Image (cartoon, rainbow, N blue to C red):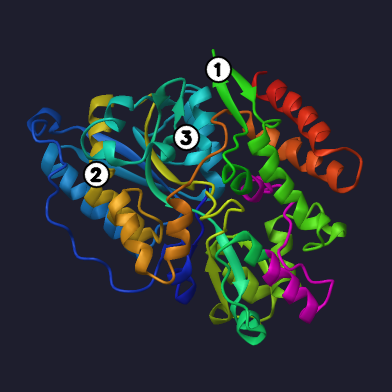
């Protein structure tokens, strides 16, 4: 997942957004996680490491300190390259085809299945199950684990929560919802006061619709598909998935979101939100700069806040686990040395600092739990604690975006063309055909 980087007050709100302002952290003491026996062995060697996006002072300081400790521990030099986001796909494609590539690379977690299918990533399974890295929850390795092998390790994460008009809630005397019924009641009150053309809680039926649908389905215990005997078996017809699907379509059929906007995605919703046409929607803090721009400064960050999406069955709904991983490239010249770099970078000390310096969520449970008392971070931390991912298959994008399998199923139900059972049965077959092609 591409992580957008912004500055100032918005960065304080952002998860998945780099904290570009503030005081840079002091260089840490040498980590106990650094390899102890590999010093002279790698002296004089050079490792090429790719970081994605444009550099900024905190990120550069982090890499400088990490590389210095790595050199102390191994004797090896590091050639660090920053790859701007528009160039990432081309650079990865060329490297996978046998061109000049890295030994270690940062990689979006949702890109791991694609590049694993191109044999561009080296398994790091042993590393994932030993030492400090074994503390990283297994639910964060969903996209990284393919046919029993782990191909990347989580480095820092971003997730989603419900963005709402705090000023509207205060004016209308609405308490922050803690249950799904309270979400519905808040949405109806917003519509009653602000007009029926306002989406109390916006339905997302566009390219990124599965972030909302997935959260609602996972909260009921549903899954999109599981792998059995080497083949994907769709689970869309299971009662648990159906329950979440009906909550999702119910946003429109119960009138909380307009029927004329069945294909809107997060960008479309953000624009309406900025123009006082949405009370709540599922997103992340990287939307805030766009809202301020789209509203021409009329809607500002201090009028907004987040809360975790409640599950209809109780508690917080799981959120999609988005974020950045670190991986050993398949054509690494020295895979042992590359693995040592990944081991150091994902040790608790360095992974925690990567998240902090980048404005991301930490992947280690105790550090994540410490955010519960932070009013800005707490909604995201609560959602992320139960985070899940879509099926780890390179064809998932075709299911979720290109063919819009679930979006089409939802529209057919909302428009009265099919029952939920009929729509999900058809979608299940299409999902299996695509994932198993």
Q: What residue sits 73% from the left and 76% below the top? A: 190
CB under 8 Å between callouts 1 and 3?
no
Image depth: mark 2 or mark 1 in front? 1
Work out how far the residue at label 2 is from the one at label 1, CA to CA, in angstroms: 33 Å
Work out how far the residue at label 1 is from the one at label 3, CA to CA, in angstroms: 15 Å
Q: What residue sits 31% from the left and 48% below the top? A: 364
The residue identified by callout 1 is 228
Please identify the quadrant where the C terminus is shown: top right
Residue 203 is inside the magenta segment = yes
Q: Identify the mark nearer the N-term, 2 or 1.
A: 1
The residue identified by callout 3 is 142
Residue 25: image location, x then y, percent: 24, 66
- Helix, strand or loop at disc 1? strand
Q: What residue sits 60% from the left and 84% below the top? A: 170
Residue 227 versus residue 279 in the image, above or below: above
Is residue 346 rendered to the left or right of residue 185?
Answer: left
Residue 127: image location, x then y, percent: 27, 30
Residue 381: image location, x then y, percent: 42, 58
Work out how far the residue at label 3 is from the one at label 2, CA to CA, in angstroms: 20 Å
- Helix, strand or loop at disc 3? loop
Is residue 246 rendered to the left or right of residue 288?
Answer: right
Residue 268 versus residue 189 in the image, above or below: above
CB under 8 Å between callouts 2 and 1?
no
- Helix, strand or loop at disc 2? loop
Residue range (magenta) = 184-213
Viewer-nearest residue: 179 or 215: 179
């Amino acid at each position: 997942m591409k992580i957008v980087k912004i500055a100032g007050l918005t960065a304080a709100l952002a998860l998945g957004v780099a904290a570009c302002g503030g005081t840079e952290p002091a260089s840490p003491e040498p980590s106990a996680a650094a390899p102890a026996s590999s010093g002279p062995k790698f002296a004089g060697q050079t490792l090429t490491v790719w970081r994605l996006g444009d550099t900024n002072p905190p990120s550069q300081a982090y890499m400088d300190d990490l590389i210095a400790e790595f050199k102390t521990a191994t004797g090896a030099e590091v050639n660090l390259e920053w790859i701007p986001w528009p160039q990432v796909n081309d650079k990865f494609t060329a490297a996978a085809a046998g061109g000049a590539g890295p030994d270690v690379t940062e990689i979006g977690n949702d890109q791991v299945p694609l590049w694993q299918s191109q044999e561009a990533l080296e398994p790091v399974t042993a590393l994932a199950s030993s030492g400090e890295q074994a503390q990283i929850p297994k639910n964060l390795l969903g996209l990284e684990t393919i046919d029993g092998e782990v191909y990347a390790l989580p480095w820092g994460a971003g997730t989603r929560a419900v963005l709402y008009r705090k000023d509207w809630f205060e004016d209308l005397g609405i308490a922050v919802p803690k249950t799904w019924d309270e979400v519905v009641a808040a949405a109806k009150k917003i519509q009653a006061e602000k007009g029926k053309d306002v989406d109390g809680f916006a339905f997302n039926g566009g390219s990124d619709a599965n972030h909302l649908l997935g959260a609602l389905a996972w909260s009921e215990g549903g899954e999109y598909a599981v792998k059995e005997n080497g083949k994907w078996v769709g689970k869309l017809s299971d009662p648990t998935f159906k329950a979440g699907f009906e909550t999702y379509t119910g946003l429109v059929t119960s009138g909380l979101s307009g029927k004329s906007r069945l294909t809107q995605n997060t960008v479309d919703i953000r624009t309406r939100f900025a123009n006082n046409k949405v009370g709540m929607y599922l997103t992340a803090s990287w939307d805030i700069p766009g809202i301020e721009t789209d509203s021409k400064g009329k809607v500002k960050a201090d009028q907004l806040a987040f809360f975790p999406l409640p599950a209809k069955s109780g508690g917080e709904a799981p959120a999609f686990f988005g974020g950045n991983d670190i991986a050993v490239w398949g054509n690494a010249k020295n895979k042992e040395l590359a693995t040592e770099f990944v081991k150091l970078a994902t040790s608790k000390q360095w992974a925690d600092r990567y998240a902090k310096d980048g404005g991301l969520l930490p992947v280690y449970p105790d550090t994540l739990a410490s955010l519960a008392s932070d009013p800005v971070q707490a909604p995201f931390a609560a959602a992320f604690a139960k985070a899940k991912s879509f099926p780890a298959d390179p064809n998932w994008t075709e299911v979720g975006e290109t063919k819009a399998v679930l979006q089409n199923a939802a529209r057919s139900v909302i428009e009265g063309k099919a029952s939920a059972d009929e729509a999900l049965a058809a979608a299940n077959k299409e999902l299996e055909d695509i994932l198993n092609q």
